[in-house]
Amino acid sequence: MYWSIDENKCVISELYVDGNNIINPWGIETADSFSFFSLEKGEGWRYKILKENYNFNENKYYAEIITKMKESEWKLVSKDILKDNKIIRYAELLTFKDGYFMDFVLRFRFKKKFISYVKINNKKYKHNNTNIYYQFPVNSVLLIGKNFKISISVLESIIPKKFQQVIYVKDAINEWVVHIRMIPIKWDKEVIKICTKWAGTKPLPQKISNFLLKNRWIKKQLWYRGEKKPYKCKLLKLINPCAFGMVKVEKNTKFMLHTSLEIR
């Protein structure tokens, strides 16, 4: 097993097992009400990198990035190590000021053709192009291929107040997406975002979000809608409104995920 790191994207972009690349680019993600950051260069919206340093070779990857977003400013440290049939991934985010956060994510992606099914929370899922997030408060997930098994586990984590750590799998087009994720269990404000590439997950004005989400039926329809029940109506798919909770996080707060991926 060996990897390839794209110097332009600055992420692990290929992982070869028995001569086949089984992944699409991995990464780290976070968001606030307005901005979306992705470690994969060229992705995300409305953030500015103030300082960055990357260092990688055939078995180690290191990145240190200071980023300013609309509602947050922080430093991210990412460390990955490949040894034999394992990849250890470590991601730590430290806030530089008080700000809002929607989530913190360690991202894995696997090509559909190499995975027969996924097992999470003692449930099996086959790829049906649903794009639904099968999400549970667990610490491990198993991907079963024809010639190998991939196990991903959380070794340790630092979870800020009002967040919980979960894992989800998603059968997106031609791939399985796995996110080890911190999301709110309590929140300090609620926003409605237009979750499309053309809008760049831009939020509605806060007063409009507050007004609409007072209605219980509207809130139920919009709450994490794209993750639970993607729209089928063409017009709604074009706009794709979804509501999310945001947590106000204090300065010097740390998010941390330390994980292990093993192929056998």
Image (cartoon, rainbow, N blue to C red):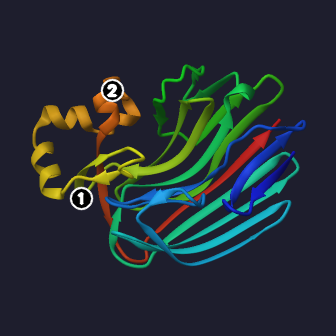
* Residue 68 placement: quadrant: bottom left
Quadrant where the C terminus is found in the figure: top right
- The residue under label 1 is 188
Question: Where residue 88 sits: x, y (%)?
Answer: 73, 55
- Position of 166 compared to 18: left or right? left
Query: Which amino acid type is shown beneath numbered disc 2?
Result: Lys
Labels 1, 2: front one: 2
Q: Visible in this render: residue 15?
A: yes
- Position of 239 compared to 263: left or right? left
- The residue under label 2 is 234
Please name the residue shown 59% across and 22% down the image.
127
Q: Counting residues from the N terminus, which is met first, the one under dot 1 or under dot 2?
A: 1
**Is residue 130 positioned above or below 98 on the image?**
above
Quadrant where the N terminus is found in the figure: top right
Q: Visible in this render: residue 240?
A: no
Please name the residue shown 28% across and 30% down the image.
235
Please name the residue shown 22% across and 56% down the image.
189
**Is residue 28 positioned above or below 128 on the image?**
below
Element under disc 1: loop
Question: Where residue 147 sits: x, y (%)?
Answer: 84, 25
* Residue 62 placement: quadrant: bottom right
Question: Where residue 250 sits: x, y (%)?
Answer: 35, 73
Please name the residue shown 52% across and 53% down the image.
105
